[in-house]
Image (cartoon, grey):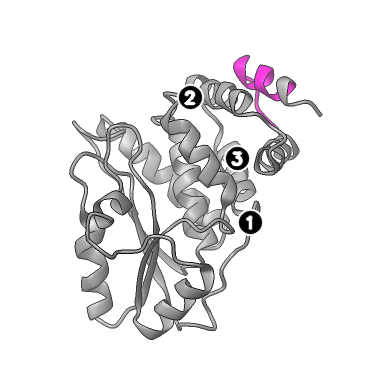
Amino acid sequence: MRIVDLIIKKRDKGELSTEEIQYFISAYTRGEVKDYQASAWAMAVLLNGMTPRETTDLTLAMVNSGDKLDLSGVVEIAVDKHSSGGVGDKTSLVVLPAVAACGLPIGKMSGRGLGFSGGTLDKMESIPGFRADLSTQEFLEQLGDVGMVLTGQTGDLAPADGKLYALRDVTGTVPSLPLIASSIMSKKIAAGAQRIVLDVKTGVGTFMHTLEEARTLAETMVEIARMTGR
């Protein structure tokens, strides 16, 4: 299997097999796929899209690129939330403390700025002393002891998404619906939450400019969750 063949197949509007997607993500995580090749692949996905099956396969391939947290031994029920993002998005700063104050543990891995939107971590790091680089062990201990965690993506959880996330930001491929959906859901699944709340933005200052686009993104992410038992 050759990476260039997968790029050409998606460029020509073909449908990648489960094995091809797994191969691409695995090789990219290991550093065998160069950034310029991954950039070409991401642009082909942006222009030609992915089927629901391809998008779910991409999500699971990124989840399986690293470790997965099992929170069942830490808390009885853990919840997570994620916003599709937009200008001025600050919901995590309000939602997490409110949910934790009601006694429901919530552990969240957030992202940095992507495209024109500011990231939750960028906002949080403006607070002196805030750490966004908690280890997996620190994540688990804080969730159990405090009932609330807000951290960045650790290197051993969905590392493929971390690499692809940064690449999309500098290659003009941020608005791709399959790449948005798989990026969000791979983080949520890898972080181990049993319940997930999705906050999908639409309109000016967001990636989904129309209500139809936002609904499609929401439905795609919900379908991924159903297919993975969340």
Instruction: Please tell me whether residue 96 is drawn above or below residue 33 in the rendered image.
Output: below
Mark 2: amino acid: Leu
Q: Which mark is residue 46?
A: 2
User: Mark 1 falls on what kind of element?
Assistant: loop
- Tell me, yes or no, whether the highlighted magenta stretch contains residue 220: no
Which region shows up in magenta? 5-16
- Which residue does the numbered mark 3 point to in the structure image? 53
Q: Are marks 2 and 3 in contact (CB under 8 Å)?
A: no
When asked about the image quadrant of residue 21, the answer is top right
Marks 1/2: CA–CA distance? 25 Å
Q: Are marks 1 and 2 in contact (CB under 8 Å)?
A: no
Circle 2 SS class = helix
Residue 187, position in %: x, y?
49, 54
Q: Residues within 10 Å of mark 2 (few under 14, many from 20)?
A: many
Image quarter (top left, top right, bottom left or bottom right) of the N terminus: top right
Q: Earlier in the sequence, mark 1 or mark 2?
A: 2
Q: Nearer the viewer, mark 2 or mark 3?
A: 2
* Disc 3: CA contacts within 10 A as few (<14), some (14-19) or many (>=20): some
> Dot 1 corresponds to which residue?
66
Marks 2/3: CA–CA distance = 16 Å
Quick one: label 2 or label 3, which is nearer the N terminus? 2
Front in this rendered view, residue 27 or 52: 27
**Residue kind at label 1, given as amino acid type:** Gly
Q: Residue at x 48, y 51 (%)?
A: 185
* Residue 6 lies within the magenta run: yes
Q: CA distance from mark 3 to mark 1?
A: 21 Å
Which residue is depicted at the point 58% across and 21% down? 40
> The residue under label 3 is which amino acid type?
Arg
* Image depth: mark 1 or mark 2 in front: 1
